[in-house]
Amino acid sequence: MEIIRVEGIAKSYGQHQVHKELTLSIERGECFTLLGPSGCGKTVLLRLIAGFEVPDAGRIAIDNTVVTDPAAGINIPPDQRGLGVVFQDYAVWPHMTVFDNVGYPLKIAKRPKGELRDRVMETLAMVGMSGLERRLPSELSGGQQQRVALARALVANPSLLLLDEPLTNLDANLREEMRFEIKELQRKLGATVLYVTHDQEIALAISDRLAIMDEAGRIRQTSNPWEIFERPTDPFVFNFMGIANFVPVRRAGESFLVGGGEQLIPWEPPQGDAPKWVAGFRPSDVQVAPEGTGIRGTVKRASFLGAMMHYLIEVDGAHLRTSIETHEAVAKGLMFKEGETCVISFRDLLWFNADSLAEVVKQ
């Protein structure tokens, strides 16, 4: 059952169109992530759902209640939408203690003092901040300040939690720690989480479903993390989700040839009538060997990076990247030098129409 329904949303700032006829639904109890490059409109969409911005057209419903609909003159204020929000910059008040920061939403709601205290202490314990309630934000680390912001968003038991790049300002270790804490809290509370990020790793780690957005503010694919990573709908999604190789393949009669040369593809050919195709695959999908069955290439660059060997290989004018664990490369005779030839095969690959690759090349 859906808790958020976005229908035909449009939003512009002057001549800049951020969203046009955008539609999206989020199910109750799931962790849903908006993932896309900077400037694609992720935060704008979250602010429209929260009520901090008003759309030019379309409507948004939360828990079966229409909260904004310009055509009908509906725009429910943010504090009446029953949600919690955590921003990238924490937004904790520097002159308030941890206790007062967390308890502020309940104070505004005029909850009884006893209830307020019990709920604040319970929420602080939930985010691992027990014993720090009398400290000021200046006496806390970045991770602790973010926990305060999270506790403040949770203290009123919202059914919906909106998180806007909440881990960006934390160091790598804290980001990893906090992303698992957020996911665990979501599971424990059964709340619905809408998470906004440009970090693919965080999105894959915490999401039940995610939507990939492009620079034009369009949603390119919505699915679970495995489907997004392993079965992307187009080259944009495939390229955005990690290091991608694209090798051109052309049709010659009934045959398919790699790059600009005459080597036949040694795998199942694409299905369709397009004259030109592109094979897409990750570096980890590439297998190299000194000899054997496959397509022949030349090592253009060999980089020793400690635990890994990275190779850039040319195949008839096309270039691809692959990585091999160093101990495996040594054990199996795969320590190639620049200029040496090798044979390439693939664990997995995807086929894309070459015309659909144009926007990826522009990036």
Image: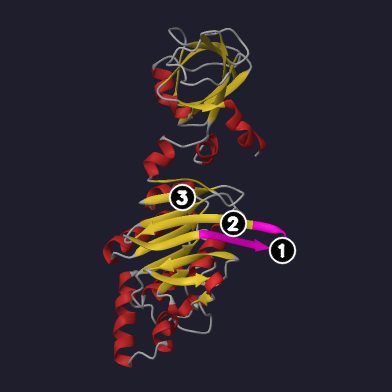
Q: Would residue 324 be found to the left or right of residue 361 on screen? A: left
| Mark 3 vs mark 2, CA separation in Å | 14 Å
Q: Secondary structure at mark 3?
A: strand
Q: From what the image shows, is residue 349 above or below residue 258? A: below
Type of secondary structure dominating the magenta stretch: strand
Q: Horizontal and vertical percent for residue 46?
A: 51, 63
Of callouts 1 and 3, the N-terminal one:
1
Q: Amino acid at mark 3?
A: Ala
Q: From what the image shows, is residue 95 above or below residue 323? A: below
| Mark 1 vs mark 3, CA separation in Å | 26 Å
Q: In the picture, which quadrant includes the C terminus? A: top right
Residue at the disc numbered 1:
14
| Mark 2 vs mark 1, CA separation in Å | 13 Å
Q: Would residue 265 be found to the left or right of residue 32 on screen? A: right
Q: Nearer the viewer, residue 278 or 353?
A: 353
Q: Quadrant of residue 251?
A: top right
Q: Quadrant of residue 159?
A: bottom left
Residue at the disc numbered 2:
19
Q: Amino acid at mark 2?
A: His
Q: In the picture, which quadrant includes the N terminus? A: bottom left
Residue at image coords 43%, 41%: 228
Q: Would residue 226 be found to the left or right of residue 282 on screen? A: left
Identify the magenta region.
8-17
Q: Nearer the viewer, mark 3 or mark 2?
A: 2
Few, some or many residues within 10 Å of mark 3 (<14, 14–19, 20+): many
Instruction: In the rendered structure, find residue 211 and report the number of the disc placed on it.
Output: 3
Q: Are marks 1 and 3 in contact (CB under 8 Å)?
A: no
Q: Amino acid at mark 1?
A: Gly
Residue at image coords 52%, 31%: 305
